[in-house]
Image: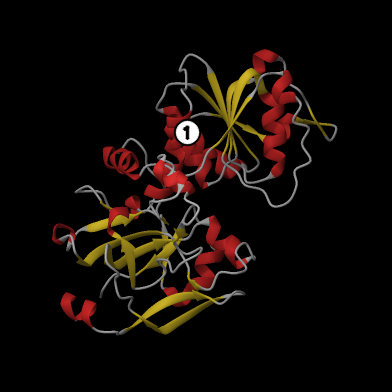
Amino acid sequence: MGRSMVIGRAADMKALYFDGEKAIYREDLKIPVCKPGQSLIRIILAAVCSTDREILRGYKPDFRGIMGHEFIGEVVGSEDRSLIGKTVVGEMNETCGTCIYCKTGRKSHCVNRAELGISRDGCFAEYMALSTDLIHPIPDGLAPEQAVFTEPLAAAMEITKQVHIDPGLNAAVIGDGRLAFMIAQVLSLTGVSLTVIGKHPEKLALFAPYAKTVEYKEFLAGGRYEKPAPKECFEYVVEASGNESGIKLALDIVRKKGIIILKSTYAGETGLNLSVLPIDEITLVGSRCGAFEPALNLLASGKVSFPPIELYELKDHEKAFSSRAFKSGFTFRLV
């Protein structure tokens, strides 16, 4: 099927559709028709994010549509002819451009934003339409299997934009998952003395080239948090565990006048006593999305790297969602 034919006819495509309760593999959804300002992308591969798994658990009960927001694809239709045939990655937040956040440089917080695979159709499909201004060509020589990490790596790099990391001080990352692994690599490039605190020895082993590692249980004593001596505390603490126990630990191990960077989101209340923040003059920084271009440059430089992504066909989505690999996803490569 030629590219012009793909754009010009309402052909069917394969996709993974969330019906409000479960993911359904379908082959009867239509290839999207681009609106003005959008480009049509043929998906090459797409990665499963923890957010996708949370959607299956009820995170977005009102969402109905194609899942997924991390992808690599080829532009097959666009008003910007220079993009045709380019291998690209894309941002997940389509914004209105007119609200107070868009007008003041905070587009990721647009009050009218549409999020791929969360509030609008995403990338777990053979084709996707996306705003052209959200598309970024990947550098020559960067493999799609590494480029697909652009979005989470950008989120990790956002920390160094929000907080100046003094390399003469020390830092801790709480968590031993995928995001924590990216954060540790990014922070290690600053030269700061880095410690990673996690619960899984087999996961912590991956961090050894970048940081000291400590098991979480070593910070527990008699069922309570043990407050370390000041010299054993940290100037910077990044909480990326995804568990509310992580922020409690962060408050225990950050030095007075130190900085906590919060990457985790929690369901429900945490029951924290936040009076320690003004008393110890601790700065708490929430951190979310980041810029794609610096992340692509860092990936292309080879200074960060990640284990291979485990790829499945869309019809095997249950295996992809239950995979314990560092990263799993879907392949759409043409045979």
Q: Quadrant of residue 32?
A: bottom left
> Left or right of 301: which side holds 187?
right
Residue receiving disc 1: 159
Q: Position of residue 221 (x, y in %)?
A: 81, 30
Q: Is residue 45 above or below residue 207?
A: below
Q: Is residue 276 above or below residue 139?
A: above
Q: Position of residue 70 (x, y in %)?
A: 41, 57
Residue most toward the left? 82
Q: Quadrant of residue 29?
A: bottom left
Rate crowding at label 1 as few (under 14), some (14 to 19) or many (20 or more) other CA atoms within 10 Å: many
Amino acid carrying mark 1 in the image: Ile
Look at the image and tell me in which quarter the N terminus lies: bottom left
Q: Please state which of residues 285 and 223 is positioned toward the viewer in this rendering.
A: 285
> Left or right of 118: which side holds 29?
left
Residue sitting at 60 percent across and 67 percent down? Answer: 56
Residue sitting at 50 percent across and 36 percent down? Answer: 207
Residue sitting at 30 percent across and 42 percent down? Answer: 293
Q: Is residue 299 visible?
A: yes
Q: Quadrant of residue 249?
A: top right
Q: Is residue 147 above or below residue 31?
A: above
Secondary structure found at label 1: helix
Look at the image and tell me in which quarter the C terminus lies: bottom left
> Left or right of 86: which side holds 68?
right
Q: Position of residue 74 (x, y in %)?
A: 24, 63
